[in-house]
Amino acid sequence: MDLPVGRCLSVVDETMFQTPTNIAGGQAATVHRVRQLQLIHPLAGRGELAFFTMSTECLRDWEDYVAMMAEICKTIEWSDAGGHTTIGSVLEG
């Protein structure tokens, strides 16, 4: 997948699971179906990876979530600074 910050790997996975017991200790009857999206960006020249992920059981809104993630990914920028910056220094401006 190509984004403004470069090429990334996109992985979508869906799984179904049932917890062994419910909150009262009895047999759980609910089967959960969860889908997740992972975007994996290599940080060029740093030997590091950045992961952006989301997961949900609300599959009827999946397309909306994917569209939101696509818009978020359009805003990603990598710093050209020589060193690593902390989140605090970014928030301070």
Image: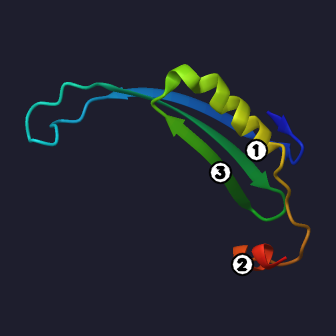
Q: Quadrant of the C terminus?
A: bottom right
Q: Earlier in the sequence, mark 1 or mark 2?
A: 1
Q: Which residue is mark 2?
A: 88
Quarter location, residue 92: bottom right
User: Label 1 neighbourhood size at 10 Å, few (<14), some (14-19), many (20+)?
Assistant: few
Residue sitting nearer the eye, 15 or 44 = 15
Q: Is residue 44 left or right of residue 9?
A: right
Kindly tell me whether residue 74 is visible in this rendering: yes
Whether residues under marks 1 and 3 lie with C-beta atoms below 8 angstroms apart, the answer is no
Secondary structure of the residue carrying numbered label 2: helix
In percent of width and height, residue 79 lies at 87, 66
**What is the quadrant of residue 68 in the picture?**
top right
| Circle nearer the N terminus (2, 3) | 3
Badge 2 crowding class, 10 Å Cα cut-off, few under 14, some 14 to 19, many 20 or more, is: few
Find disc 3 in the rendering and name its residue: 51
Q: Which residue is mark 1?
A: 72
Residue 60 picture location, percent across and down? 53, 20
Decide: is 49 above or below 83.
above
* Amino acid beneath label 2: Gly
Going by the numbered disc 1, the residue's amino acid type is Ile
Q: Secondary structure at mark 1?
A: helix
Query: Can you tell which of label 1 and label 3 is closer to the viewer?
Result: 1
Q: Which residue is depicted at the point 90% across and 43% down?
A: 4
Q: Amino acid at mark 3?
A: Phe
* Side of 85 relative to 11 (left or right): right
